[in-house]
Amino acid sequence: MSVEILDASIICNFINDADFFTKSVEKRFSAIDSNHDGILSYTELASELKKLRVIETHYGIDGAIPSSDELGQLYHGLFARFDHDGNGSVDLEEYKSEMREVMLGIASGLGFLPVQMVLEEGSFLKLAVEREMAAKVYV
């Protein structure tokens, strides 16, 4: 983990660099695709989503631990967002499309004022910052 400064423009530049974004998505997709069949099952994607710790309880919310049924509904709902054609699996294009939407949502939420954040190594946000820093070196 590292502390980085980012804003919407860094994320948008990351997404708009089609080659870099596509390679980043392909690398993550391959890492999630544990059986290497070229598609993500619910189990594979849910495992990745759980690593993101979408539900945290240590932000001053005592006793707000969701039940296993509530977590199941959450992960099924998130999976459905990725599974655009509803066939029960997520292919690379669906994953790329949804990750683009997720990143644009984050960019929209951040706005254009710099924000300091703790980022995990290898995360799309960290890759966006690294890409931006590398681009500035070459200018």
Image: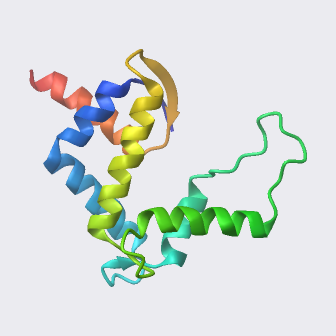
Q: In front here: 24 or 7?
A: 7
Coloured how? rainbow
Q: Is residue 92 above or below residue 98?
A: below
**At x 46% / y 79%, what residue is drawn?**
41
- Is 100 located above or below residue 71 in the figure? above
Number of labels in the image equals 0
The residue furthest right is 63
Q: Identify which residue is drawn at 49% across, 69% down.
A: 45
Q: Residue at x 89, y 41 (%)?
A: 62
Q: Residue 32's x, y, as percent?
A: 42, 69
Residue 92 seen in render:
yes
Among the 4 quarters of the image, the one containing residue 6: top left
Give the residue drawn at x 21%, y 55%: 22
**Residue 96 spot, x, y in % from top left:** 30, 58
Residue 73 location in percent, x, y? 67, 67
Q: Is residue 87 left or right of residue 51?
A: left
In the picture as drawn, the residue positioned furthest to the top comes out as 113
Q: Is residue 119 left or right of residue 112?
A: right
- Position of the C terminus, as image quadrant, is top left
Q: Residue furthest front?
A: 85
Q: Which of 22 and 3 lies nearest the eye of the viewer?
A: 22
* Rendered image quadrant of residue 66: bottom right
The image shows residue 45, relative to residue 102, as above or below, that is: below
**In the displayed structure image, the side of residue 32 where residue 54 appears, left or right:** right
Does residue 122 show up? Answer: no
Q: Quadrant of residue 67?
A: bottom right
The x and y percentages for residue 88 are 45, 81
